[in-house]
Image: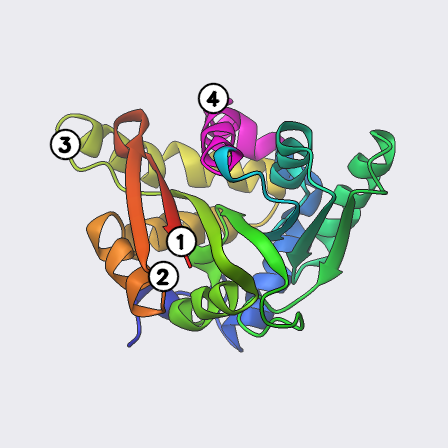
Amino acid sequence: MHYGQELIKPYEEGDKTAQVERMFDNIAPAYDVLNHRLSWNIDRMWRRKAILQLKPYNPRVILDIATGTGDFAIMAAEMLQPERLVGADISEGMMEIGRKKVAERGMENVISFDREDCTSLSYSEGTFDAVMAAFGIRNFANLERGLGEMYRVMKQNGYLSIVELTRPMQFPMKQLFYVYSHTFLPVYGRLVSHDSRAYSYLTKTIEAFPQGEKMVEILKKVGFREASFRRLTFGICTIYLARK
């Protein structure tokens, strides 16, 4: 089955995965600034809540899918104190920034980065105690395949924690978010990142992406035996927790 966001591409021509790689390489220098400013720094709280979902299970080896510049990985390493945390992403431009941040914090013995197509991971089955993803799975060219890979590389009884941008469902936040995401967000994103398409693409994928109950159905479809969700900040963001 295919989902609407899978058909949305940042640019005009070519394979979606290659386009997503190119887009994130383009915006990598401005990505952290934009993330924090466009969310009014609330994204840090969202990440923290997603990580806290994993804390009761004390995962020792963790995979951060679509790790980007490593903010989620660094926060998880600080909060969960794992033995090893691997950040996987298709964009070397993003991960190069992540590697510098990890080195500045002296965390190279815990956090490493691998260039991976997250819908076709190179890791063996049952490698990780937990898998997590922040604001990245909307970019998968095939959502079920990507989630299936996350399931495959996770140990039995392991946990998946996802934090993702979503559409508010209730008045007036639904209307306010629509105006914000169609006006200020793409304009400011273009000015700072100098990529005219990236933040219009962001808005379109948020609107097309399955959320809430539908996402829980998909998680169970790919194999997870337990899955739940919780909306944050009036539904602008949703966190998911699933068990293999």
Residues at marks 2 and 4, CA–CA distance in whole angstroms:
33 Å
Tag on residue 40? 4
Q: Is residue 196 visible?
A: no
Q: Earlier in the sequence, mark 1 or mark 2?
A: 2
Residue mark closest to the camera, 2 vs 4: 2
Q: Which mark is residue 243?
A: 1
| Disc on the earlier residue, 4 or 3 | 4
Q: Amino acid at mark 2?
A: Phe
Where residue 138 sits, quadrant-wise, is bottom left
- Give the class, few, some or many, for how many residues have Cα within 10 Å of label 4's Cα (few <14, many ≥20): few
Counting other residues with Cα less than 10 Å from the Cα at mark 3, is it few (<14), some (14-19), or many (20 or more)? few
Q: Which residue appears at 59% of the width and 44% of the height?
A: 59
Up the image or down, 207 lies above or below 116; here it is: above
The segment highlighted magenta reads: 33-55
Q: Nearer the viewer, residue 93 or 2?
A: 2
Depth check, mark 1 against mark 4: the one in front is 1
Identify the secondary structure beneath mark 2.
loop
Contact (Cβ within 8 Å) of mark 1 with mark 2 = yes
**Residue marked by disc 2:** 224
What's the residue type where badge 4 is placed? Trp
- Would you say residue 54 sits in the magenta stretch? yes
Rounded to the nearest whole Å, what is the CA distance between mark 3 and mark 2?
Answer: 29 Å
Mark 3, residue position = 170
